[in-house]
Image: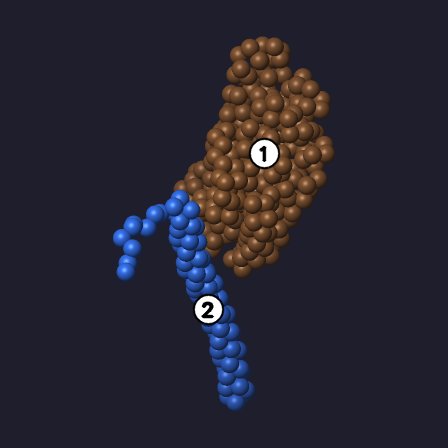
Amino acid sequence: MSSSTPRVEHEIHGRRRSRNVGLGIVLGSFVFLVMGMTYVKLTAQNAEMAAEHAKKQAAQAAAEGTATSTSSQETSD
Amino acid sequence: MSDISTNTRVETRSDTGEAGFGDYFALLKPRVMSLVVFTALVGLLAAPVPVHPLLAFAAILFVAIGGGASGALNMWYDADIDRIMRRTQSRPIPAGKITESETFAFGMFLSVFSVIMLALASNFVAAGLLAFTIFFYVVVYTMWLKRWTPQNIVIGGAAGAFPPMIGWAVATGGVSVESVLMFTLIFMWTPPHFWALALFMKSDYRDAGVPMLTVTHGRKATRAHIIIYTILLAPIAIGTGFTSIGGPVYLTTALLLNAIFLKGAWDIWRREEALAEADDYKTEKRFFAFSIFYLFAHFVAILVEKGLAPYGLGGWS
């Protein structure tokens, strides 16, 4: 048999709920913040690596170009 | 880090251990935190190196949490005198909302958390400065100086002066003349600001046995100290105008504000105690209120200079 008396909401329950809800929001926001920070850091790192790679490739291509022109000059001499 | 709360409402709870979310937030001294956030943000934005907005937000958030954590540890250690002082009786521990051990655990956890997270979000210099700030405020000021020397406010004021330096370090990864000047500005501003408060909140410090200058050296000496520190503050505030974070707007603001601040300090120095008591410390209260605006306006002026720079108007260039 179920009791028909309504459940009395004590002030303590309200405070406990506010604490739990607040903590939930804080933790949820923290997860999103860490995700965002990771994304920004990785994107910046990738951009840096890509720029470095492009610079290296350009330097290599320039070196190869110089070597080719020098060797072709030697052949024609 | 100064606490300017003047709330005197006391609310007690018999059933401790069931504090609400707001009670924990109150442990972080939100009013002090707002000053920390603002000055750290100015330090970060005034720096010559741009920071990604999300990383800047995260860094300021962790600086604020670190500042709040030191506030919680301060409340834990000072719980005994907070119960006596009228303006601190409504804090969560004296009001019986949160226990002292809970506050200690909360403060310690947030201190470590904020330093680690700031290191991850920015760099080790900024994180190191934050760790030192927390240590300075909790150990050097709260545990050592506050109850020992009347110069507590002078040296302890350094803790509240670090945030713009941390903000600058977040962006640049180092320390420079500009960040040191922002630090010095708050450092020199703290004594006259607090001593003006001590002049009209007189019974609080005496009852709690805190060796405030008003208690140890008397009110006349406190008035003299206020004008000395205000005179020393002026060249620092104006001198900052000639660095890379200054400019015509800042310099004009600094000249005007320092003239008014000096006039206020002069009035306080010249006043007789009987007259002050008769008009309920009107001049002292006005000086205290103006001191808050004084600091705020200096940092806003730094921001304005930075904001005008892209249009070729800010700074000296």
Label 1 crowd (10 A; few <14 / some 14-19 / many >=20): some
Residue B247: assigned label: none
Q: Is mark 1 on a helix, strand or loop?
A: loop
User: x%, y% of residue B231?
Assistant: 63, 24
The amino acid sitting under disc 1 is Arg
Residue B33 visible in the current orientation: no
- The amino acid beneath tag 2 is Asn
- Say which of B222 and B7 sits in front: B7
Instruction: Name the residue carrying label 1.
Output: B83
Looking at the picture, tell me which residue is in the foreground, A22 or B172: A22
Residue B266, given in percent of the width and then of the height, sits at 60, 17
Q: Colour of chain A?
A: blue
Up-down relation of residue A38 to residue A72 (above or below): above
What distance separates the C-alpha of mark 1 from that of mark 2?
A: 55 Å
Identity of the residue drawn at 57% across and 13% down: B277
Q: Are marks 1 and 2 in contact (CB under 8 Å)?
A: no
Give the quadrant of the N terminus of chain B.
top right
User: Chain letter of disc 2?
Assistant: A
Name above or below for residue B130 compared with residue B245.
below
Q: Residue at x 66, y 23 (%)?
A: B214
Residue at horizontal 49 percent and vertical 36 percent from the top:
B12
Name the foreground residue: B181 vs B137: B137
Residue at position x 43%, y 63% from top? A35
* Quadrant in which residue B229 is drawn: top right
Tell me which chain the residue with mark 1 is part of: B
| Front tag of 1 and 2 | 1
Q: Nearer the viewer, residue B229 or A70?
A: B229
Label 2 packing within 10 angstroms: few (<14), some (14-19), many (20+): few
- The residue to which callout 2 is attached is A46
Q: Where is residue B156 in the image (x, y as percent from the top left)?
A: 65, 37
Q: Which chain is brown?
A: B
